[in-house]
Image: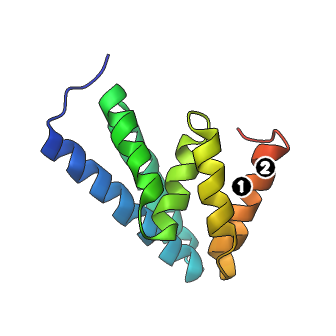
Amino acid sequence: MDIILNSQALDRLLHRFAMAAKSHHEALEAMDANRAEQHARMVAALYSAIMAAGQLGKEQFSTLLEYPEPVVAAMTAVYIIREEPEKSLRVLQRVAAEPGLLGFRAAAAIERWQNGDWD
């Protein structure tokens, strides 16, 4: 059953997803495993809440693939790759060119998808 969210509530969830994705990345960069895990759980919960809004939630979530910050676009791509594989892979390929951990993680996601190891 889809949850009915007004536009404002859905926008807040999308914003919170973006903030949680950035916080997750910052925790990974700081090598703070506990904080990274907390933010990973928050990202997953927000994704579930957004998807509970049904088709509108899916459509709005996919707009985050175009988010100007690569961390958010990549996290979105990872979550929506099954539904939007071509768009997600384009985002991940772009982000894979980024230096450091972010680029490495995007490249690893691409490799997992291409090898059929996506769970």
Residue 109 is labelled as: 1
Query: The residue tagged with tag 1: helix, strand or loop?
Result: helix
Residue 116 visible to an observer of this rendering:
yes
- The residue most toward the top is 1
Q: Amino acid at mark 2?
A: Arg
User: Could you tell me which residue is drawn at 54 percent across and 42 percent down?
Assistant: 80
User: Could you tell me which residue is drawn at 44 percent across and 70 percent down?
Assistant: 69
User: Could you tell me which residue is drawn at 28 percent across and 58 percent down?
Assistant: 15
Q: Position of residue 40 (x, y in %)?
A: 49, 57
Please state which of residues 41 and 97 is positioned toward the viewer in this rendering.
97
Q: Amino acid at mark 1?
A: Ala
Badge 1 density bin: few <14, some 14–19, many ≥20, Cα 10 Å: many
Q: How is the image coloured?
A: rainbow
Residue 112 is labelled as: 2
Quadrant of the rendered structure where residue 104 is? bottom right
In the visual, does 20 lie left or right of 74? left
